[in-house]
Image (cartoon, rainbow, N blue to C red):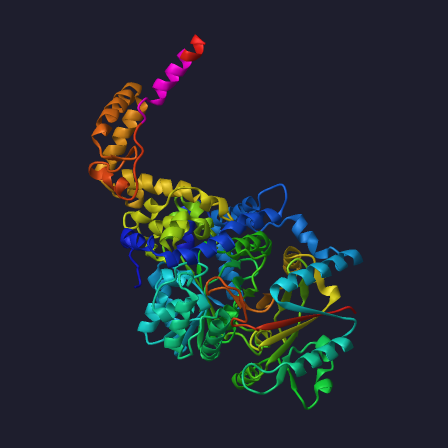
Amino acid sequence: MLNQDPLKYRELAAKAVQDKQLHKALGKLRDKFGRNAVNLYNQLSSGHDPRQDAKAVRRKIVDNLDVVLETLAANIQARGGHVYLADTGEDAVEYCLGVARRHQVARVVKGKSMLSEEIHLNDALEAAGIETVETDLGEYIVQLKGEAPSHIIAPAIHYTREQVGELFAEKLGEPYTDDPPTLTAMARKALREKMLTADMGISGGNTACAETGHVTIVSNEGNIRMATTMPRVHVVLLGIEKIAATLEDHDILLRMLTRAAAGQKISTYVSYVGGPRLPEEPDGPEEFHLVLVDNGRSRILADPDFREVLHCVRCGGCLNVCPVYMAIGGHSYGSPYCGPIGAVFTPLTQGINACHHLCQGETLCGACKQVCPVDNDLPRMLSLLRFKLANGDKSWNVRPQSLPTKLVFGAWSVIMRHRRVYDAMSLLAGFCQRLLPRSNGWIRRLPGPLGGWTRGRDFPPLAKKSFAQRWARRDTTRRDA
Amino acid sequence: MSRIIERVRQALGVRAGDGRDKLVFAKSEDFVGCADATATAQERDDWMKTIRAEAQALNLQVHECPDLDACGEAIATLARERDPEWGSLKQIMRWNDPLLHELGLETRLGEEIAVKTVPKADFFGESERQEFRREVIASYIGITTADYLLADTASLVLLGGSGRARSVSLVPSIHIAVVPASRMLASYRQMLSCLDAMVLPSNVSIITGPSKTADIEATLVHGAHGPREMHLFVVAS
């Protein structure tokens, strides 16, 4: 069930577009959050777009990432925390395993972390014989089911309440119910036991404050506070780019994040966690580790065309408005980051050729840019990825994806730039289309490789008279009148 | 570590120590200044209205008390009415804070319900920590104060420290916070500005209502993993 292969995109997407149940679930997300986000931004300030403020802050941080990283690391260390900068996902996993071994950890409880999915941490912990329990309700459901999350913020959105009821009846031995409050209470009971007895908590972070030496964690369920307060050891996983410089930066960033993610003014819990407990505190972790993960991010940083994608705050807002995500769901992407943001970020970190379906599957409709709290121009970057796939790019190790595509677009370019060729080709096409099968005046099937277009829809034929011809005649009649 | 920082510098095409830190950590005057903004009586009344409205949507129960005596009595009544979620023991854990001493809960509840206080010490050994942990887990109500109450979102700001254990607002099923009205601030921004002016503790929790989730069919349910019930007592004087 677990799809980790972006090359299976077409196969999985073809199945998902038939899945009415999935569409019903995703429709709820769109109606509750997607449509609301932009209205909420507008309430924030009158006269100007708060997304531009957030973008300016993210740009300042990313453009000076070295300074912010160094300050954060120094201040966390000054608070008695450990900091590790991991080059690759494997390095980060190895470090976490090392900490777990040193503390003879038998059970880990996790707060939601997309980065831990990116580096496949759970598998590694389980392989080392460490019980690993997801504590976010959605993540817990997905984990019990043996699947991967299908949404950055709402991981189990693709299940109905009935399916969750059956799952809990089977795995937790509880009587069947499809009542969300009762189901939530069951998970509350089961997970409380786990959280109170775990040796180590692993969480992600929503951002960090370099100047004060804190990691900033946002949650609604309280599971992350549990997982970071009760176990002896707390490990935070954070992408190197996801940090902030000052508390003032947090003002606009957090306001935009919670609005974009869940239509909330603020989430239930915002925690600033800086290092282990102090000697005079009776609770809190005894050891604190911040693992900052590069895993391909500095490569993106080096390309001014794509640096913008590192401004992302991982709110998941672009998923909630994306017509492609709404049709195919999160699993089709074969990557922890799905939707429009995944379609840019995943190819850049896992290989553009290997993930070509992701950027080619999006529609470039622009809804993601409109809803993005930091105004990320995802459509521009999607187009650029496609350009690299068509033409190849040595700096990103991209092979031209297919010679025919390149030839067709080359020919198209010649036709469009030369009036006479264009006219001649129009005439030829007008003649040739008479040979194609029609229904109700539409072309039912295109020949050869173009046939893919007409597999699920008809194609409008060229008009009998071209626009240029009609325009010329319109001009004449007017003069006549 | 330095290798990756160096790689980041190369990617950005910048050098170390070129003075960019001034730009990166610069703060606007407006931000720095808003910590000291004082509120008029009218503003406070308006803030209280906003808090009441926000709280309703959050399932946060707001009680307004004229003084700590009335507040203590109301909390005692609440404690008698509620039943523990886990087990049958009725025990309260409260922060070690002068304001909470004055509630007189120990005398009000007497033998009925045990009221425990977070221990204060310069150092906590393993066994003392385990002991405290057991007591918090055994409590059905946790009582804290808050350093700030934010008007625009009805959020409580809890700074950690000695006697102010973080699990008290988290592990018990019911969280009660007692806050003098004078600790109200206009916004999250003003609170950040106040925090910016101090040396921060190792933990700051900003809490807005009881815990909740919408992970099953995007249906909102209160009482996920944190407290399922939350009461805010605003004390006038």
Q: Quadrant of residue A306?
A: top left
Task: Inspect the magenta stretch and tell me whether residue A467 lies in it.
Answer: yes
Q: Toward the viewer: A409 or A465?
A: A465
Is B53 placed left or right of A155 in the picture? right
Res. A213 visible in picture? yes
Q: Residue at x 28, y 47 (%)?
A: A353
- Residue A119 image position (x, y, % from top left): 36, 62
Judged from this view, the residue extending furthest toward the bottom is B111
- Residue B199 image position (x, y, % from top left): 63, 64
Is residue A194 depicted above or below A153 in this figure?
below
Is residue A421 depicted above or below A91 in this figure?
above
Q: Toward the viewer: A440 or A5?
A: A440
| Secondary structure character of the magenta stretch overall | helix
Query: On the rendered image, what quadrant is the C terminus of chain A found in?
Result: top left
Q: Quadrant of residue A439?
A: top left
Judged from this view, the residue extending furthest toward the top is A480
- Looking at the image, how many numbered discs can be counted on the residues? 0
In magenta, the rendered stretch is: A463-476
Task: Inspect the magenta stretch and tell me whether residue A58 lies in it.
Answer: no
Res. A393 visible in picture? no
Query: On the rendered image, what quadrant is the N terminus of chain A found in?
Result: bottom left
Is A433 placed left or right of B185 in the picture? left
Q: Toward the viewer: A383 or B30?
A: A383
Q: Residue at x 27, y 53 (%)?
A: A11
- Residue A180 image position (x, y, % from top left): 48, 69
Q: Toward the viewer: B152 or A422?
A: A422
Q: Residue at x 58, y 59 (%)?
A: A266
Is A298 placed left or right of A282 in the picture? left
